[in-house]
Amino acid sequence: MSAFDDLYAANEKFAESFGSSGLTGRAARGLAVVTCMDSRIDPLGLLGLKPGDAKILRNAGARVTDDVLRTLVLAVVLLGVERVLVMPHTDCGMAKVTDADVHRLAGERGIDTRSIDFHTVPDQNEALKHDLTRIRTFPFLPKEMPVGGAIYDVHTGRLTPSDH
Ligand SMILES: [Zn+2]
């Protein structure tokens, strides 16, 4: 028994009915979505997408980190991405704690996390504005590329586009 047996068993069933989709690794809808790791978010479902349509980049808080920027450059240069939607969500755990809180909680487990910037979100609106600006001004991405932001409401399923 491993901690992953349930998953491997489920995949056996999945693979039985899997016909090669013929998809390539390019984003068929020319889209990249940056969203949170929150388990309530179904990025494809809520945007009317299917596998093959979009690059989905997920991390804690849907933050535009250096690695997200690196991935976006690759997605544009190699994988057909022509537009980016940054999609944080309501009731996000990252908006409920500060970096200091995380350091303290980790410290209680004997783990010193002070060398890590967790990019917690004191103000979701400001964080989204900051993150959109980071993409729009990043010198290695096309200046004319559409970059949008929208907040996903995990309780209604509704997406609210931001003005930023
Ligand atoms: Zn979240």
Image (cartoon, helix red, strand yellow):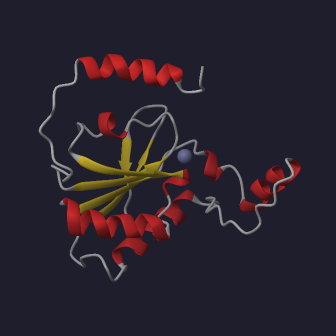
Say above or below: 37 vs 113: above
Q: How many marks?
A: 0
Tell me the residue at 54%/53% (across/down): 61
Where residue 77 sits in the image (x, y, percent)?
22, 69
Q: Is residue 107 left or right of residue 25?
A: right
Q: Can residue 141 be seen from the camera position used here?
A: yes
Residue at the limit of the structure toward the front, as seen here: 1
- Image quadrant where residue 8 sits: top left
Residue in the picture at 23% in, 36% down: 50
110 and 91: which one is in front? 110
Q: Quadrant of the N terminus?
A: top right
Where in the figure is residue 161, as x and y percent of width and height?
Answer: 35, 53
Q: Position of residue 45 (x, y in %)?
A: 31, 33
Residues 27 and 42: in front is 27
Q: Residue at x 88, y 49 (%)?
A: 108
Residue 139 spot, x, y in % from top left = 33, 83
In the picture, the quarter occupied by the C terminus is: bottom left
Residue 136 relative to residue 90: left or right? left
* Residue 164 seen from this side: no
Q: Is residue 44 above or below residue 145?
A: above
In this rendering, the answer to whether 76 lies above or below 152 is below
Q: Farthest residue to the left: give it.
A: 22
Residue drawn at point x = 48 percent, y = 54 percent: 62
